[in-house]
Image: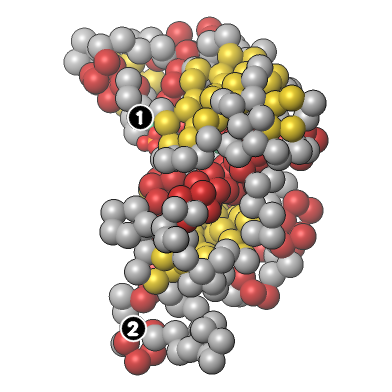
Amino acid sequence: MAGNTIGKLFKLTTYGESHGKAIGGIIDGCPAGITLDFEAIQNELNRRKPGQSKIVTQRKEPDTVEYYSGIFEGVTTGTPIGFVIHNTNQKSKDYSHIKDVYRPSHADYTYEKKYGVRDYRGGGRSSARETASRVVAGAIAKQFLSKIEINAFTSSVGDIFIDKPYQDLDFSKTESNIIRCPDEATAEKMISKVEEIKKQGDTIGGTITCVIKNVPVGLGEPVFDKLHAELGKAMLSINAVKGFEYGSGFCGAKMKGSEHNDLFNEDGTTKTNLSGGIQGGISNGMDIYFRVAFKPVATVIQKQDALNSAGEIVEMQGKGRHDPCVVPRAVPIVEAMAALVIADYLLLDRVSRL
Ligand SMILES: Cc1cc2nc3c(=O)[nH]c(=O)nc-3n(C[C@H](O)[C@H](O)[C@H](O)COP(=O)(O)O)c2cc1C
């Protein structure tokens, strides 16, 4: 199975399945000399972990990381960083009902058809459990970014959304509520919505906005590895992501050039930033901001028609511990993937000219 590595210089390879013994990763290309803050890494994992609030899956995992290499006396050595997170709270019997049945809109059918064999327990490799490894690597990448700040937050749940520009938000409030929305009034409405959906045994989608500040001018490798292309790929690789837009995004398609152009100030900054901090695939020093759309996830605790391996349509009922809305847990995943891309592109930029 190819496709388990991201990055060109700062590279992450992940391994592991939801109900296997462990998940983990290898980070190759992390520069030597970073004094790691292990508490900050665990803190990021705690933001992603299941069981953290009443509106997420109740699987209980401590998500404790063990490092096997690449770190000496708390400092990165420049050699591959190998790490593992043991799975401790699998309930595989919850999944015996999908052994020969493919859940609609999950990855059961496509994995089985592609590989001919499928670890159905907890969704196997297609489970978002894998994203814990991304969060570890992203938290290490964040420690290499120095002044660059990455802040993601829940910007919508279903049809409830924050009705103000990100510049009017206080990102320090994102962690003050369980949905991770920095606007308190909107957060309360979002939480009620998820609770209502959960009671119905249903799921709901939403969006995450991410803002990256203090990015130097010059990151991005045209033409195929433009910065926004790589951010888009990183975000679209997250489970359940169905959309990515940066800057003015799809709204820009409704505007005129005279309205859309970001006029310069004399120092090269721009008066507006509909470009979303990237022009020609290269960062221009303004804030980079983008939105990621998450679908309502597939496993609903309701009866639905599904396909079985004998080619019959059968009725099935979702079981097990699932997320009614993945957006609050996905906020640290979006930040981690953004950190991995920016770290990689900071390193790549060092060889772009003499
Ligand atoms: C943080 C997070 C938690 C998730 N939890 C669940 C879940 O509890 N149940 C579920 O069916 N899908 C869940 N998903 C989504 C599935 O992993 C995903 O839909 C599946 O792998 C199919 O991939 P696709 O939706 O990208 O096509 C979660 C996704 C994320 C990001």
Read off the residue under disc 1: 3
Q: Mark 1 is on which residue type?
A: Gly
Disc 1 or disc 2, which is closer to the eye? 1
Residue that mark 2 sits on: 255
Does residue 277 lie above or below 328 as drawn? below
Viewer-closest of 2 and 283: 283
Check the picture and name the quadrant holding the N terminus.
Answer: top left
Q: Is mark 1 within 8 Å of ligand 1?
A: no
Q: Where, by quadrant of the figure, is residue 114 drawn?
A: top left
Element class at badge 2: loop
For label 1, the crowd category at 10 Å Cα-Cα, with few meaning under 14, some 14 to 19 and many 20 or more, is few
Residue at 62% of width from left, 15% of height from top? 87
Q: Quadrant of residue 198?
A: top right
Name the residue at 64% across, 52% down: 145
The numbered disc on residue 29 is none
Can residue 330 be seen from the camera position used here?
no
Say which residue appears at 49% left-offset and 78% top-offset. Answer: 273
> Could you tell me residue 94's position as x and y percent?
53, 13
